[in-house]
Image (cartoon, rainbow, N blue to C red):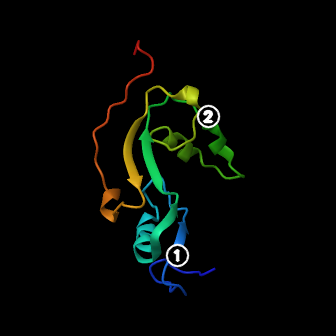
Amino acid sequence: VIHGLMEEVMLPVKSVDIIISEWIGTFLVHESMLDSVIFARDKWLAPGGLLLPDRATLYIAGAEDQAEETTSWDSFHGLNFSALGSAYRQVAAQQCLFRNSLATRHAALLQLDLYTVSVAEQEFSVPFQLVPLDSKV
């Protein structure tokens, strides 16, 4: 095991056959370490080598409000975070949801092939449309 930043470490070999990395951040590329994986791929991955994961897709979909109860913020481990609980309802939130909460079909916003992706491809803008699942909407 070699500890250090990918861009600064020295490997005792010229190339590697496999790179395994947990680089995925919020919304796939935000605060992620994809730059480091690209660096490692370009510097050390042997021809025909494996990247795991080797693909990633960012999807978006509309969901019904799951009416998350925010009074639990009033006493969280003895601390009063009630101001955060009310603010939470005013901003978008990343959370897990159940499939039956989906209100729209999903749309793919970004597809990455880690064998070919560049650092620049992490910044993107794409048009998309969310189509309601309920035809009455």
* Left or right of 114 in this view: 100: right
Where 128 sits versus 55, above or below?
above
Residue 70: x and y, percent? 60, 38
Residue name at image x 48 percent, y 84 percent: 14
Q: Indicate the amino acid at tag 1.
A: Val
Frontmost of labels 2 and 1 is 1
Q: Secondary structure at mark 2?
A: loop
The percent coordinates of residue 69 (x first, y second) are: 62, 34
84, 46: nearer the viewer? 46
Q: Secondary structure at mark 1?
A: strand
Residue 72 horizontal/vertical position (percent): 66, 41
Residue at the image point whose x is 36% and y is 43% from the top: 109
Residue 16, numbered circle: 1
Instruction: Indicate the quadrant containing the C terminus: top left, top right, bottom left or bottom right.
Output: top left
Q: Earlier in the sequence, mark 2 or mark 1?
A: 1
Task: Give me the C-alpha separation between circle 2 and circle 1.
Answer: 49 Å
Residue 30 visible, this orientation: yes
The picture quadrant where one finds residue 116 is bottom left
Return the residue nearer the eye: 102 or 56: 56
Q: In the figure, 101 relative to 43: above or below?
A: above
What residue is at 44 percent from the left and 34 percent from the top? 61
Residue indicated by mark 2:
69
